[in-house]
Amino acid sequence: MVILGKEAMKTIKRAFAGMLAASTWLVAGTAQAINDAPGGPAVNQLNFQPPVTKIAEELYGLHTMMLIICAVIFVGVFGVMCYSIIVHRKSKGFKPAHFHESTTVEIIWTVVPFLIVVLMALPATKAVVAMKDTSNADLTVKVTGYQWKWGYDYVKGPGEGISFLSTLTTPRSMINGKEPISDTYLQEVDYPLVVPVGQKIRIITTAADVVHSWYVPAFGVKQDAIPGFTRETWFKAEKVGTYRGFCTELCGKEHAYMPVVVEVKSADDYAKWVADEQKKMSASANEPNKMYTMDELKEQGAKVYAANCAVCHQPSGKGTGPFPALDGSAVVKGPIAGHLDLVLNGKGQMPAWGPTLSDVEIASVITFVSNTWDNHNGVVLQPRQVADARNGKVPAVAVVGNGA
C-alpha cells in the first residue's frame, strides 16, 4: 500500500478543486443558449452568409469555383507526388533518372498555370467591374464613418434630404459582462439604414476622421471610407429583411462597436418610412425658433449625449484615457461661448460636431451637460443662440432658468 504524504494530498486536493471549478465554468458557459444572429452570421457558420443580391451570388459562386480549382490542383499535385514516392521507391529497385532539362516539362508548367490563372481571372474581373457600376441608381446614400458610428445622408432619390447617425445600442453593462449577451450583441443600432427592396442603391463612402470600411456580407458589399476621398459601390437587395455587417478597418479603440445594420423594406413600407421621416424633419424645421425649458432640453440632451458623447466621456461624465471628465469640467463651468465653440468646432481629439448635429441637438446636449452630475450651472442654451454662433455671433449670456 502506498501512503501519500501531506504535501501530495494537498496537491491532489488543489488539482481536484481546479477541475471542479473548470467544469462549473463550462456548465455555466453552456447554460446560456447561443442562437443565430438575426440577419447576421449563424452559429458555427463556415461559409458565406446566404446572398440576397446578384453581386453576392456571383461572389459566392466565384468563391466556390476557386475552392474547387484549388482542391483539384492540390489533389493532382500531391496525388502524383504520393504515387511516385510509393510506387517508384528505391526498395522496389527503381533508380532515379538523371536529366538536365526538358523542353516539354517547361512548356507544360508554363502553359498550364497560365490557363488556370486566366480561368480564374476572367470571372473575377467580370464581378469586380459589375461591383463598380453605380450608374442608373434608384437611390443614392452618402455613408460617413465616424469614431465610432455611421452617418447616413440620402442625397438623391426617394427620401432625399433625410439624414441621421447610426450608433450602437448594446448596453455597456452587457459589454462589460454584467449581464448575458443578446443574439444581436454588438450588432444593434438605434437608427439603421433603410432602403427599398428591388431598387439599386448607390453608396458613396467617406470618413470624418480615420479610415473606416462599410461591410454587409449578405450584400457582397465592402467599401473603404477614407477621409478626404469618396468611394462608390452599390447593391440591390432582393429580399425584405434586416441585414448586419460591421466596420472592417481597424479605426481605434471602439472599432468593434460600430456595426452596420440595413433594413430592406417593401416599396409601400419604405414610402411610409420616408413620409414619417419627412414629417419629423418638417416639424424640427421650426424647432430652432422655439424657446425650450431646461427640462425639455435636458431630456433630449440625454439622448444626444448617449448617442454621441458617452463613448469617449463615459455615461457618468467621468471621462477615460485622453478624454477628459465633463463632470466638474472647467470648460463646462466656464463661459458658455467657450463651451459652445468647442462643441461646434472641436479641438485636438474632440471632433467638430457642428457639421453633424443640429442647432437643437447642440443646444440640448450643452444644457444637459451643464446641469447634470455635479454641474449645476442653471444654464439653458437655446437653439437660436447656436445658430447665431454658427454665424459668428458670440452668445454672451445664455438663457437662464427653467421657463420659456
Image: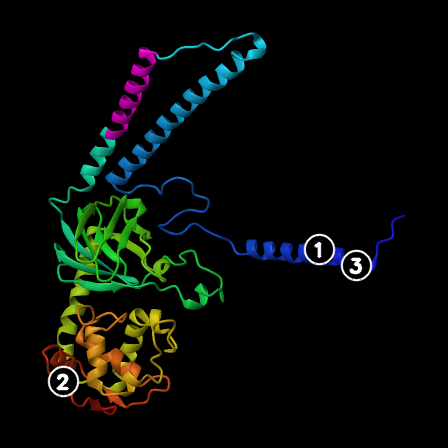
* Residue type of the residue flagged with mark 3: Glu
Left of 188 or right of it: where is 150?
A: left
Q: Would you say residue 120 sits in the magenta stretch?
A: yes
Residue at image location 51% in from the left, 16% down from the top: 85
Q: Are marks 1 and 3 in contact (CB under 8 Å)?
A: no
Residue at image location 23% in from the left, 73% down from the top: 347
Q: Is residue 202 visible?
A: no
* Residue type of the residue flagged with mark 2: Val
Label 2 crowd bin: few (<14), some (14–19), many (20+), radius 10 Å: some
Q: How many marks?
A: 3
Q: Secondary structure at mark 1?
A: helix
96 over 68 or under it: above or below: above
Q: Which residue was labeled with disc 3?
A: 7
**In the drawing, what numbered circle is on residue 15?**
1
In the rendered image, residue 16, in percent from the top left (x then y), is placed at: 72, 55
Which residues lie in the magenta part? Answer: 102-121
Quadrant in which residue 318 is drawn: bottom left
* Residue type of the residue flagged with mark 1: Ala
